[in-house]
Amino acid sequence: MDHYDYLIVGAGLFGAVFAERAKNIGKKCLVVDRRDHIAGNVYTYERNGIHVHAYGPHIFHTNDNAVWEYVNQFTRFHNFKLGTIANYKGEIYSLPFNMYTFNRMWGVLAPEEAEKRIREQREAAGIKEPQNLEEQAISLVGTDIYEKLIKGYTEKQWGRSCRELPSFIIKRLPVRFTWDNNYFNALYQGVPVGGYTQMVKNMLEGIEVRLGVDYLTHKGELASLAEKVVYTGAIDAYFDYKLGALEYRSVRFETEELNKPNYQGNAVVNYTDKETPWTRIIEHKWFEFGKDAAGNDIPGTVISREYSAEWKPGIEPYYPVNDEKNGALYAEYKVLAEQEENVIFGGRLGEYRYYDMDQVIARALAVCGKELREGLV
């Protein structure tokens, strides 16, 4: 049987980066994934000329020059910038929160007027040191915006009261006192030409990949094939949940093709009231300006309604629930992981941490730099 330097469990971004970097210095790698496709949660597939984001919208954004230079070895990027819309019971607001949002909510035109409204509402709520997501949100944008545009959406997404969620979750949400409607405040951003799957395929060129292989079911047999294992699956599953199960949020999608050129006129529309069962609707063609590979207008469209759900075994875990209880449990699993000889844990599930795509790649490059003793690119 073939023997490998590295067995890489998971063909997502972390695994693909590690495999590519290892191959680049002459290491022999085998990549396995229990799914029937590469690219993990950034997987895209083509449907009538439209690249469908199978696991939700992914817009690459980063301020890291090294990461940007690295990914541009494997793809070109459309100059796509996300401008999300929030729909609250038919009222339309801009996301990120900016002067368009404040004008629609309060009729204000000057930044100082918006800042005054937020300050007054924060003081009225008596918030000095935010202790949870609700208090952090009100501190950032005031009570009105919290009630209409954050509370319902967040509680649908996480399945918990905003008062039970840690404050840091909302700190990722941009708030600007300008008329800039670009969601991500990043120097570099876009969507890969040809989709993320093609980008990852290019990264894995010349590397053996086996799909439909469940590592945990065949751990002993597979681990014996390599000197070291790079594991990007769920850390608690690796240890057969011996300390208990970490909590995750999962997502499901209802995707349909429509015989019309335009459903909602935007790539992403969030539904922020609690009564609407889905969190958002994605119209995939607008990630690439409604054009096919030849630059022609696409006559139909594909939409996905996204629903949030509590994770349970048998469905995909998406978002770690990084509260105090789960943080303490992960710390115990991390101790076990550090005792595993010749196993590297990485990625969102392996490190039980919410990572954006650029952060996953930066982390993988850093691990490679240490493990392989080579530069980032």
Image (spheres, grey):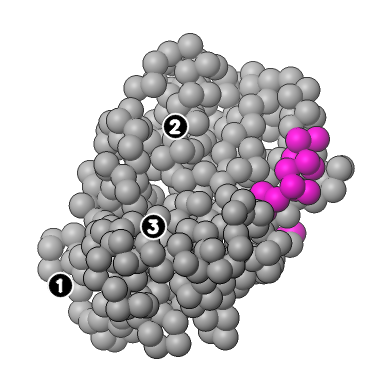
Sequence order check, earlier mark of 2 and 3: 3
Q: Closer to the camera, 171 or 331?
A: 171
Q: Is residue 51 left or right of residue 227?
A: left
Q: Quadrant of residue 283?
A: bottom left
Q: Is residue 289 above or below residue 236?
A: below
- Can you say which quadrant of the picture contains the N terminus? top right
**C-alpha distance separating marks 3 and 1:** 34 Å
Farthest residue, direction top: 373
> Farthest residue in the left direction?
295
> In the image, is residue 11 part of the stretch drawn in magenta?
no
Locate residue 13, reporting x and y percent: 47, 41
Say left or right for 187 vs 153: left
Q: Which mark is residue 297?
A: 1
Q: Residue at x 28, y 70 (%)?
A: 100
Q: Is residue 160 left or right of residue 239?
A: left
Instruction: Tell me residue 264's x, y (percent).
Output: 31, 80
> Which badge, 3 or 1, comes first in the chain's sequence?
3
Dot 2: what SS?
Answer: helix
Residue type, numbered disc 3: Val
Residue assigned mark 2: 362
